[in-house]
Amino acid sequence: MLTLVPTPIGNLEDISLRALKALEEAELIFCEDTRVTKKLLGLFSQKHNINFENKEYKSYHSHNENQILKTLESKLFEKNVVYVSDAGMPCVSDPGATLVDFCIKNNIKYDVIPGANAVLTAYAMSGFIYNTFTFHGFLPHKGSDRTNKLKSIMQSDKLGILYESPHRLLKLLEEVTIIDETRTIFLVKELTKLHQESFKDSAKNIFETFKSINIKGEWVVLIEPIVFQGEALNISDIQDLDLAPKVKAKLLSKLTGRKTKDIYQELL
C-alpha cells in the first residue's frame, strides 16, 4: 500500500497523529529529499518519543521520478510504502502525482492523509469571499510565458493563487501594478513559522510598501479576480460576429489557445 503523508510547512506541531502513525509503520519512504526527511523524523522522534529506525529511504523528486517509475513493480507495494515531500501536501506543487497514477493503473491500494497546505491556509487567511479559485504554483521566471500567464490570471473571474520567491516578489508586484494598480491582493510569508506576516491592500500600495521592507521568505500571493457585470464571451459569440476572417481568427486564438493560422484556414 502507498500512503501520501503531508508534513508541516513550518510549525512542527501541525503534524497529525495519523501522519505520525503512517511514518512509524512505514517500511519504505520515498522522499523528495532524503536528508530533509531524515532530519524531520529525527525531530519527531525526540518530540513524540517514536522510533523511526530500520527504514529504507529512496529519493523521488521531479528530476528522477520518470527513471524510478520504470523500475517500480507492483509487489513493492506489498510493503508499507510512504511518500513525503519536503514540506506540505504531496502533489500540490510537489512530486507525488506520478506515484498515485502508478497505483491507479496497477490496481494498488493507496491513501492520502490530509494535512498542512499553504494554498488553503492562505486562502482562509485572505478574507476574500470568492468561492472559486485557481492555483498556479510558481509563474515562469521570465519572458513571454511569464507575461502571458500573469495576464490570464489578472483577466480571470476566479481568485488567483500562486507562489513566489523573495527574489522575484517585487518584480511580480510591479507587473501586477502596471496591469491594474487598484487590484486588491493578499500576500503572506513564512506560513506557520515564527516570522509569518501578511498584507492586504491595492497592488500599488503594496508595491510601494515592499520597496522598503524585508521581503525574505517564501510567499503565497492571492490576486482578486475581475468581477464581470455582463456575460463572458464564448466561441459561438465570436463566430457569429461579422468580422474579417483574420480578425476573427485572432480573437478565437486568444479564447482557445489554438494557432491563429490554423483557425484562419478553417474560416476560409
Image: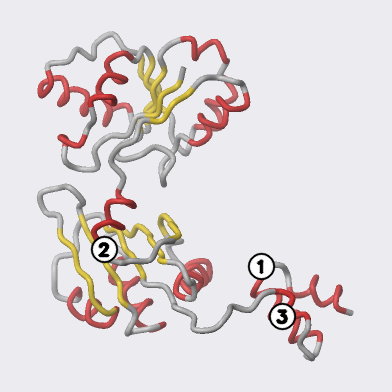
Q: Amino acid at mark 2?
A: Ser
Q: CA distance from mark 1 to mark 3?
A: 16 Å
Disc 1 is placed on an element classified as: loop
* Image marks 1 and 3: residues in contact by CB distance under 8 Å: no
Q: Using the rendered view, name the quadrant where residue 60 is placed.
A: top left
Q: Using the rendered view, name the quadrant where residue 34 is placed.
A: top left
* Of the image marks 1 and 3, the number of the one nearer the N terminus: 3
Q: CA distance from mark 1 to mark 2?
A: 31 Å
x then y, percent, for residue 259: 73, 70
Q: In the rendering, which numbered label is found on residue 126?
A: 2
Q: Residues within 10 Å of mark 1 (few under 14, many from 20)?
A: few
Q: Amino acid at mark 1?
A: Gly
Q: Residues within 10 Å of mark 3 (few under 14, many from 20)?
A: few
Residue drawn at 44 percent across, 74 percent down = 154
Q: Quadrant of the C terminus?
A: bottom right
Residue receiving disc 3: 237
Q: Is label 1 or label 3 in front? A: 3
x then y, percent, for residue 30: 40, 24
Name the one closer to the observer, 66 or 44. 44
Q: Is 115 located above or below residue 139 in the figure?
A: above
Q: CA distance from mark 2 to mark 3?
A: 35 Å
Residue drawn at 44 percent across, 38 percent down = 95
Q: Is 115 located above or below residue 82 in the figure?
A: below
* Of the image marks 2 and 3, the number of the one nearer the N terminus: 2
Is 172 positioned to the left or the right of 263 in the image? left
* Of the image marks 1 and 2, the number of the one nearer the N terminus: 2
Residue receiving disc 1: 257
Q: Amino acid at mark 3?
A: Asp
x then y, percent, for residue 265: 86, 75
Q: Residues within 10 Å of mark 2 (few under 14, many from 20)?
A: some
In the current view of this chain or complex, which residue is farthest to the right? 268
